Image (cartoon, helix red, strand yellow):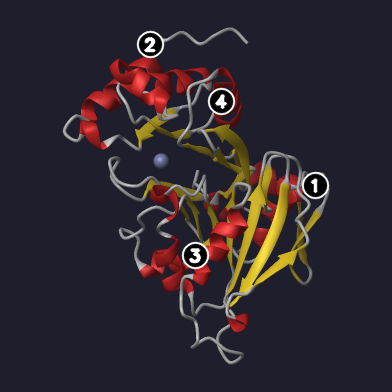
Amino acid sequence: MTWLVQPSLVNEPFSDPGLFIDFRFGRRALLFDLGDLTPLSPRQLLRVTHAFVSHTHMDHFAGFDRLLQVCLHRTAPLHLIGPAGFGDRVEHKLKAYTLNLLDAESVDFVIVAAEFSGGSVDRVCEFRAREAFRRREMAAIRLSSGVLLDEEEFRVVGIVLDHGIPCLAFAFEEKLRVNVWSEGLRRLGLPVGPWLREAKRAVRQGAPDNSEICIRDGLAISLGDLKQYALRTARGQKIAYVVDLAYDEQNVEKVVALARDADQLFIEAPFLDVDANIAAGRWHLTARQSGNIAKRARVSRLIPFHFSARYRNRADELAREAEEAFRMAEPPPD
Ligand SMILES: [Zn+2]
């Protein structure tokens, strides 16, 4: 099965946290967090349609500047989603620049900043290049509770965690993976073409098997036949991203629900468990705690990162501690 997206950490684990989610097809990407983005090329950054910011501590937001600089002359809008008060943060960033060269003739690059405080996306504002990025309040987007972005092939959901301040965690959920089996298509004597996109959409929407899929004028096939001979479906991929949280029952319950059965869980592991008191004082996890959470969420793969600089030469210890907790602890009964 071909995957819809490929996630990769922006930096090595001691540097700023961030996840780049690249789409296999179509020039598109998502970002979770905007720390140091220098490893990403302008081409990669230009593909970013949505950036989800957990909170605005510097290591999670300082990369906004580079993203803005690269995208300033593009026509497609940039959507940013962050915690309560995020619109103000974006506005302050934009106000820091002298923008006298932007006018009514400029490419009208639009930044949309949305705030999420746990229920639904509840406050949205917009900044347009042609208005020198003056803030405009917009109507809030109506989505189901906990949903930050809902598209045909995937959704992004979020939760609010306690990091001393509100901090968001995210999960990318592909809805249903539908792949074309080219050998099956050949046996049916059907050509590849844009009609396959419609067929996939019909499968995703649960259309009945007797639905007619139009291939071209005068040529159609039932969805049932197509599914039987040329389409393969599977559960979609799920990727969770969790950083900057205290290890308390409420946070843990929320993360376990968010990351439940994820294919990949990217989770912070800043401290060794011997330094659990330091971790607690800074509202962070230890590597063992990260592993426990991954175990409870029954994820397939754990990727610990966001390591504290105090362990600069001991990355393997942090990774091993997280992995051991993940592998060893028994899952609790449901
Ligand atoms: Zn952080």
Read off the residue under disc 2: 328
Q: Give the Cα separation between the discs numbered 3 and 2.
A: 45 Å
**Nearer the camera: disc 3 or disc 1:** 3
Dividing the image into four quarters, tell me where ligand 1 lies.
top left
Q: Give the Cα separation between the discs numbered 3 and 4.
A: 30 Å
Q: Which mark is residue 207?
A: 1
* Mark 2 Cα shell of 10 Å, populated few (<14), some (14-19), many (≥20): few
Which residue occupies 36% across, 58% down?
A: 37
Give the x, y percent position of residue 36: 35, 55
Q: Amino acid at mark 4?
A: Asn
Read off the residue under disc 3: 93
Q: Give the Cα separation between the discs numbered 4 and 1.
A: 39 Å
Front-lying residue, 106 or 154: 106
Using residue 268 as the reference point, say whether residue 204 is left or right of it: right
**Nearer the camera: disc 4 or disc 2:** 4
Give the x, y percent position of residue 261: 55, 27
